[in-house]
Image: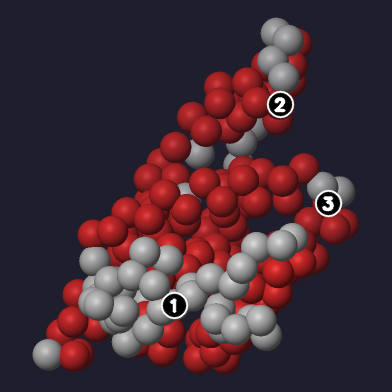
């Protein structure tokens, strides 16, 4: 359970933030469309999304990820049948499932950052990375903290993802507190 929560935060924080930063830089006319695409995983019925991911993780050559690996000459991997690969595979799916909400939260926060702060940083010679570190992140720090807490809380609600994909296995490698309670 702790490994799942840790990995979910490690991936569930920077990836949606990066996506929100990228979306915030596109033309305003297209921003809404990109935000809607980012939110799409949230509105897909969870069981449908989980079954699609289960198909993508299929250990045979028909699974999407193994087909991609075969295309570059790598043997198929037992994504959900390996004690070492199952948890990262589930974290990837959980990150995808929850990223849309985080992206929208970060996009809303980014719109509140005063443009004159960016202008001042550019006049001081700050490039895009320096502006992100010195202007954007401090300006949305409180939103980041709240979103990390929300992401942590949501990791305990991913019973459905884990149960449909692995039922807590293999070798109890993907159990979290709710799946262990359910199994017991």
Q: CA distance from mark 3 to mark 2?
A: 19 Å
Element type at mark 3: helix
Position of residue 37 measured from the top left corner of the image (x, y, whole percent): 72, 69
Element type at mark 2: helix
Which residue is labeled 3 in the image? 28
Residue 114 visible in the picture: yes
Position of residue 120 measured from the top left corner of the image (x, y, whole percent): 69, 15
Which residue is labeled 1 in the image? 80
Q: Where is 62 relative to 2, above or below?
A: below
Q: Residues within 10 Å of mark 2 (few under 14, many from 20)?
A: few
Q: Where is 149 relative to 21, above or below?
A: below
Which mark's residue is nearer the viewer, 3 or 2? 2
**Residue 126, located in which quarter of the rendered image?**
top right
Position of residue 137 measured from the top left corner of the image (x, y, whole percent): 52, 33
Position of residue 11 measured from the top left corner of the image (x, y, whole percent): 47, 53
The residue shown at (65%, 51%) is 19
Is 79 placed left or right of 67 in the picture?
left
- First in sequence: mark 3 or mark 2? 3
Which residue is labeled 2 in the image? 128
Between residue 134 and residue 19, name the one nearer to us: 19
* Circle 2/circle 1 CB separation < 8 Å: no
Give the colour scheme shown: secondary structure
- First in sequence: mark 2 or mark 1? 1
Looking at the rendered image, the quarter that the C terminus falls into is: bottom left
The residue shown at (32%, 87%) is 167
Between residue 168 and residue 33, name the one nearer to us: 168
Q: CA distance from mark 2 to mark 1?
A: 39 Å
């Amino acid at each position: 359970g702790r490994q799942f929560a840790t990995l979910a935060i490690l991936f569930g924080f920077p990836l949606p933030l990066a996506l929100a930063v990228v979306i915030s830089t596109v033309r305003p006319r297209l921003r809404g469309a990109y935000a809607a695409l980012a939110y799409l995983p949230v509105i897909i019925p969870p069981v449908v999304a989980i079954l699609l991911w289960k198909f993508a993780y299929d250990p045979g050559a028909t699974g999407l990820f193994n087909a991609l690996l075969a295309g570059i000459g790598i043997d198929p991997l037992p994504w959900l049948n390996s004690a070492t690969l199952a948890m990262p595979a589930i974290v990837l799916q959980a990150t995808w499932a929850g990223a849309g909400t985080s992206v929208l939260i970060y996009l809303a926060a980014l719109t509140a950052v005063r443009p004159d702060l960016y202008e001042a940083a550019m006049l001081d010679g700050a490039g895009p990375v320096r502006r992100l570190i010195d202007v954007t992140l401090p300006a949305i720090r409180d939103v980041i903290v709240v979103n990390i807490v929300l992401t942590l809380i949501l990791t305990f609600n991913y019973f459905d993802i884990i149960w449909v994909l692995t039922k807590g296995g293999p070798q109890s490698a993907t159990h979290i507190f709710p799946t262990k309670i359910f199994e017991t």
